[in-house]
Amino acid sequence: MCVFGIWGWGILVFFLGGMVLLTYFFNENMIIAQFYLRKENTEKATAWLNKITNYETQLNKNQHGYYNLLLGLMESRTAPLKSEKYFKKALQLGMKMSHNIALAKLSLAGIAMAKRNKREAQMYLSEATKDDKNKLLADQIKMMKAQMAQMDKQVVRGGYRQY
C-alpha cells in the first residue's frame, strides 16, 4: 500500500501485522499478567493468567517455562511452600533468559531455607549466582546469603530459639 501512495493504510497494515506477529510469539494473557504483577495487583494478574486453560496447546513451546514461572510467583505470594513445584517445572521446561532462570533458582533457595534445608539452599544460591550474568539479582542473592548466615547462629534449646 505504501508503494502505491496510500501511506495511512500501509502504516495501519504494518501495525496490525506486527501485533499479530507479536501475539504469536508472546501470549497477550501472559504479557498483561506480567504487567499487573509488576503493579502489585495480584488479583488481576491471577485472573489474566487463569484465562490460559491448557498451556500446552495455547502457548508456544518456548513459553511453557515462563508460564510456570509466573504461576510460581503468584503462588509464592499466598502459599510459598506450594510454589516449589511450579519453579521446578519452569526450570525443567527451560527458559531462554538467564535472569529468569536465576529468579527461579533464587526462589527455590528461599523455599529450601524455609524448610531448613541448608545444603539445598546453598546449591540453588550458587547456581543462581552463576546464572545472574547481568547482576540483576545481586542484592537479593546477597540478602539471601545473609539470611543463611543467620540460620547458622540460631540454636534451638529447650524448644525456644536463642539468638
Image: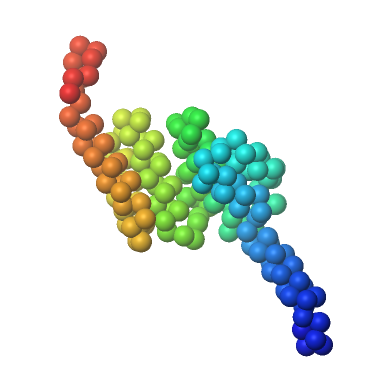
Q: Quadrant of the C terminus?
A: top left
Farthest-out residue, top? 158
Q: Position of residue 43 (x, y in %)?
A: 60, 35
Asked where in the image residue 37 lies, by quadrant, the reply is top right
Name the residue: 68% across, 45% down: 52
Q: Is residue 85 visible?
A: no
Q: Position of residue 2 (x, y in %)?
A: 77, 84
Is 44 or 6 nearer to us in this picture?
6
Name the residue: 27% across, 46% down: 142
In this rendering, the answer to whether 61 lies above or below 2 is: above
Name the residue: 70% across, 64% down: 19
Whether residue 23 sits left or right of residue 126 in the image: it is: right
Is 54 or 138 nearer to us in this picture?
138
Q: Is residue 41 visible?
A: yes
Q: Position of residue 29 (x, y in %)?
A: 66, 49
Name the residue: 68% across, 60% down: 23
Q: Position of residue 61 (x, y in %)?
A: 61, 57
Look at the image and name its color scheme.
Answer: rainbow
Whether residue 33 sits left or right of residue 103 in the image: it is: right
Whether residue 66 sits left or right of residue 13 in the image: it is: left
What is the count of numbered marks?
0
Q: Quadrant of the N terminus?
A: bottom right
